[in-house]
Amino acid sequence: MAGCLAARCGRPRDTSVVVVVLETSEVIYVDPTTGYLHYLGKHGEDLFDSEAAALNYITDGSKILCKSTTYSKAVLGYAALGSYALLLVATQLSATVPTLPGGGCIYTVAESQWIKIQLQNPQAQGNGEVKNIKELAELDIDGKYYFCETRDITRPFPSRMTLREPDEEFVWNGWLAKPFMDIGLPGHCVVLLQGFAECRSFGGTGQQGGIVALLARRSRLHPGTRYLARGINACSGSGNEVECEQLVWAPRKDGQGQCIPFSSYIWRRGTIPIWWGAEIKNAVSVEAEIYVADDPFNGSLQYYQRLGRRYGNKSSEVNATSQKKPGVVPIVCVNLLRYGDGKPETVLVDSFKSSLEYLRSTKKLGKTWIQLINYDWHATVKLKGQQQTVEGLWRHLKAPTMAIGFSEGNYYNLKQQLKECKGSVIFNDDINGGFCMESIQNGVVRFNCADSLDRTNAASYFGALQVFVEQCSRLSISLDVDAMFGLSSSRYPEYNGRNPRTLPPGWEERFDSVTGKSFYIDHNTRTTTWEHPCQEAPQKPWKRFDMTFDQFKGSTMLAPVNHLAELFLLAGDIHATLYTGSKAMHSEILNIFKEETGKFSKFSAAQNVKITLQRRFQNYINDSSRQKQFEMFLGLRLFKHLPSIPISPLKVLSRPSGCMLKPVPSITPVADGGSSLLSFKKKDLIWVCQQGADYVELFIYLGEPCQVCQLLLTVSHGVDDSSYPATIDVRVGSSVDTLKLVLEGACIPQCSNGTNLLIPLTGRIDPEDLAVTGKSARPNIQESTYLPLLYDFEELEGELNFLNRVVALSFHPSARARTPITLGEIEVLGLSLPWVDMLTDSRRGPDFVELLHEKLSSIPANVGSKEFANSSNSFLPRNGVLGSERASSTKSSSSVLQGSSGNFVDFLTGDFDMPNQSDVTENTSFVNVEQTNSFDDEFDVNPFATASETPSAKVNSQVEEFDRAHLYLKFFESFSGNIKGKGLNFEQMMKLEIKRLCLDLSAAERDRALLSIGVIPATVDPNRSVDYSYLLKLSSLADYLALLGHTVHEDHANASIGLENINGHAIDFWNICENDESCTGDVCEVRALSSSHASATSESSSIFVECSQCERRACKACCAGKGAFLLLNNTYRDLKIYGGSQGGGYSALADNFVCKSCCSEVIKHALYVDYVRVLRSLRRKGRTEQAVQKAVNQVCGLEFSRISDFTKRVQYGQKQLKQLLDGEESLAEFPYASFLQTVETADDSEPLLSLLAPFGIGEQKSYWKAPLDNTSVEFSIVLGGLSDVSGVAIIVGSCGYSTSDCPIVEIWAGNKINREDRTFIGKWDVHDIMLSSPHLSGPEKTSSMSEEPRHIKFHFPNPIRCRIVSIKMTLNHIDSHSTKFSEEFDLLSLSEGTFSESKSTTPQNSFIHAKRIVIFGNTLRKETNPDTSMGIMRMKTYLDRSQPLGRFRIPVEAERLRDNDLVLEQYLLPNTPGIAGFRLDFFNVIRPRVTHSPSSSELDMKKLSLIPMEDRVINPAILYLQVTIVKESGKLVVEEYRLPDVKVNTPLYYDFQDLQQDVRCVLFRLLGDVTAFVDDIAEIDGSNLRNLPLATGLSLSNKIKLYYYADTYEMGKIGSLSARDMR
């Protein structure tokens, strides 16, 4: 067993940290802010030799720091859910199947615990989401879930697959296990199944006994409760579907386990697999109303195809003779419903029959053969009694059961024994030995009643009972009563009990001369036989099918039968409880073989009535809540239940090993220099800066390179809250000399101590883009607020850089502050690439490399160069359709062709890569190219297409200078002509946007192009083109369509489980037509589109569908997308589970369409809006992918002829490094280490960061080199942590050293970036070293990676503890000599020293070069920060000296709200005191994750992604509050405040820059991304995604109060009451 320990550690008032310590002594940290799981596999940090060592490390040797400790047996799952994280563990397990044949134990979760982790994430989260999270944590786990740690039990026994390749249909914690997969520890969370697993031992008539196990696996394809999960759904899954397996084996009593015979029988149970449902009107109604959908058979075909694939005999050579029809997979459906006249279930029986007739008529079942047996269980019991009911069932089951059979085989613990196996052999890495299969079950029997509960459980028991007796017989375990009493059926009973060698008269035993096997001669009859004459006569197989009930009972040992009945009783209760909330009914029939059965018949009847009432009440009251629990547990419909929860939480990258690069000034000396500001253990920290500082600047080095996304500040101050900074500037960059300003002058409100302020950050935005889009423009007092409800037409795009390593923060004090600036904890949140996986030989490394190759193959080859920023967006697939694998022809404007010159050019962008050529001038004219009709440019884009479906980029050197903006303007002119866009309608504007996005133009590039021809961009803004009421309706439909899209395609992904790839229709979700695509004419009966100049394409002319509304035949051009069908028919009404049965029978696998004539304009326009939203999202993802590829190319080149080469190189590289280090550690390896400053690099060199890349990465003969004109370079390297450095090694490049390029090497060490704090280590001349090491000179003679690389080591006289190592390499005179190590140098700065100013006289072709830089020594496993408690205490004492003024509310004469409550006007009374500021109680809104239909990458949880970056992170929603103060004189004072993200209703105090006197009116206007937020609702329930036009939670009503400052003692009692009201 792999158990775990969850410890909640921390000091009083510290942030809680939950640490999971696994039995393997691995520690997984839970980030206390975002909930991100952190694990690096570093020995001494999160990998230890023992559990005691791990606990001692995380508690600093004091167990008092553990607030709570939970010991558990297994980890079942984990989820970070905004304000909370939930860790699900099993605290008690029951080994219900102790030992399977071949090893492995099945554990049932007896007791579980949801460990709730409070997170510090201030992201807005609604009360409805918090309520749903609490409901999730109340899900009943105990006794209903099981797992096996060593074997795959999601498939019939024995499984051919390993534990890490389970069948997704039966894995219930896939979503909860994903966080462990993301950190490379998939085996640390068990594969959890829902259902039942237990076994019983039983004895036979002789000494041989056996074990029977009943395994019941519940399918997750249609999870849920009784009245919400019936029939089939959009995933082609049936409600209450269970796969049952009866496993019988005979363990060897000698314990050797050399050969274990076993047999396995599989059957299914579930509701009828058609679209139907039942509805209860109230809690006391007698019967539920049963209804069948209008089109009930959608998905039924896929359901049976899934069964056929799963239960088809794939080993025909084993038992081909026993099959009824070779290759046929029989599926026998035993229907137990009542079908008499007047019975409500009759409609289901008739529909069931019709469904099978329909399926046979389609001729798509292939080798699947379906038989239906109708057997009215209740009527037969009532008419004939229980015993005859059982007999009748056996008569029906005899033929199909014998035809289907069951699997038989033997387990051998030695694989050598398998060589003699004549059947199928099964083995994998999880098994010691293997299985030899004598026969394999072919087909399956499926039982059903209305709910797949009581009748189904009883019938399946009696069917499995017959198989059980036959299984025992085949295993030589006799259950015959005659044998138990010594009665024999041998041919010579008079010889029973004698020596087995005794033969009857006339018999002789001989031995075969070839095999040595005994055979027997009957001289009486002159015959021979292999069988001993005294052994029992062979029994007739399946003989008990022909017995009556009494004969069966009288001839069979009842103890094993009752053991089996006990298992079925327990399993029935589990299934009934999961489905209905109550135990099973009518279970007394399972005790029919017990003598005392009749005694409890009356009690059973009363119990059935009680359970019936309980079920009805539970179903009516609790079904919806339990349904929600199941969905959240499975990770389904999260966009509905948890709309604001991020799929992948951000990392806090400023924590150790992050550090401060400069000491933070403080009013009293503190030893740690400010590093405690980055520690999560100091939430109550108050850092007081120096007195009188105009600003405080902090330089933070991040633990990993990342895209910086958010800044989290913890407000900390003394008695006076004005001491906390008032504004902040933020700069980020990959080094200290490349910092870029990303935020300037952002206001920080005054808040209570401990308030968390989250400041969203974007990359640097070009000021020209800001100006041309007019994004910074603000409306005047009288103007109404512009609301881009459809989408942000003027979206700004910030720079993306995944190599950001340094964050510089500048804090500015408040104007009224009377004390020094105070600071609290600072956290930098971001997204980092999986560098460790990409650059090491981990299990996922080759997958990431393959994905990188796939991405790199679709963009220009110079992606890592300077021209990368202008390259095209390769993420956008072109000309695809939903689910289709067809390749459409590419038109001239979107094609990229390959020219004879070998240059690579993207025709969409004009970007190209030409060897030995740098920049290419843009906006040059296109020469000698025939102008084609701009309508020919396709822009059908399939966001659901996988990467493999995206057309690969081709190249055409003739179009390298063609401008994308020129193409856009040509397309624009084709619409508007000479009227400059003023006459465009809504549809034309949307097509312009689609064209812009397909050409990969940003909004700023579009605006510049339009302004160049005199067109105002606002005239083509779709948000301004329709009237307000239509805009509201259109936005509402588009929002609803987004939810429908996620629902449908989530179902589509789940429906593909267990089936072959499901190809979509040529008509996709939107079917946005091109301008030149017209109706095909006579063949089309709709003719919604016509064109006088264009003809139908060859593709559209061959695609026709039938409209579901008018039933006319429509061509592709006249058909609307599938989204129109969903909106028009409302088939996913209320978004029930998987579409539910309520909606009329839609299946995600069905091709349902509607023609454009049957669609209203608003529905067609809603498709356009959703389509554009998806394309905008794909553009963001494309920019992200390009930034990722650029970052990778700036570190190393991952070019390998085969993926296997990657693993080999990394393995060889690690061996080389181990030889080089000689027992020490590498301290400066990327991504943990990086360069503090940039170093100029030659054009044909490997990137700078390749010097720190792990060994084995990159081309073997490649190396870094400086430009020819650089004779001196300095590398300032920040180590991965505070370390004791022993020396530096330089790996020599493949060119080797010569007398002209031998550098002089100087080394410094320090902890901060200040040069005066560095310690000089020494100076070496490589020329002198070469004299004693001639192998360093000249080109590399061997390319073997198994040899130790050529290198030079510079050992320090003593290890030095430092964080930064500076290495300077200088080319000097050829005849120069090294300075001996003992000499002293004044090298505290670059300008000092005798050698630093020397001029080189190196030859012209000499340059500085190196392959790798290795810094070796020992890392401090846990940095021991100095005790700062006394210094912090003195700071607090200093702050408590000043007594603050109190805030008092200013009364308002009148208020007025307008512009959807976004504008608040407050009119003041005469003689009002001077206004000091205002208080804002933060809004009760959330930003939903889902805003458009999904792409495939958002659906597949297992799909590998380079970076899981959400749109909300790339393009954060930011709110601004504009304050206009109108004075009595008419003068206006305007101030604007950028609002941070805080918890709901958090009071934020903003002081005006100056005291405002004589104020008549104050006007507050909420600006920014107001349309990105929705109200706090329990769950998104369909069409009401938002309360249009805006979330009511953004209303300024009762949100803002004005205040002034005054002395609390002077104001008296009335003033103090006002003060309390304000506070």
Image (cartoon, grey):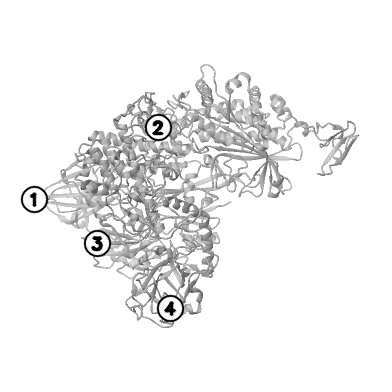
* Pointers 3 and 4 in contact (C-beta within 8 Å): no
Question: Which percent across, then down, holds residue 373?
Answer: 59, 24
Question: Which percent across, then down, holds residue 519?
Answer: 84, 39
| Circle 1 SS class | loop
| Circle 3 SS class | loop
**Mark 3 = which residue?**
813
The outermost residue toward the left is 1529
**N-term-proximal mark, 3 vs 1:** 3
Front tag of 2 and 4: 4
* Pointers 2 and 1 in contact (C-beta within 8 Å): no
The alpha-carbon separation of the residues under discs 1 and 4 comes to 77 Å
Q: Is residue 1018 above or below residue 491?
A: below
Q: Amino acid at mark 4?
A: Asp
The residue carrying pointer 1 sits among few (fewer than 14), some (14 to 19) or many (20 or more) residues within 10 Å by Cα, namely few
Q: Amino acid at mark 1?
A: Ser
Mark carried by residue 1132: 2
Mark carried by residue 1155: none
**Mark 4 = which residue?**
1325
* Pointers 1 and 4 in contact (C-beta within 8 Å): no
The alpha-carbon separation of the residues under discs 2 and 1 comes to 60 Å
Front tag of 3 and 2: 2
Give 1293 or 676, whichever is nearer the viewer: 1293
Q: Is residue 1577 left or right of residue 370?
A: left
Question: Which percent across, then down, holds residue 1093?
Answer: 29, 32
Q: Is residue 484 above or below residue 966?
A: above
**Mark 1 = which residue?**
1529
Q: Is residue 8 left or right of residue 1606?
A: right
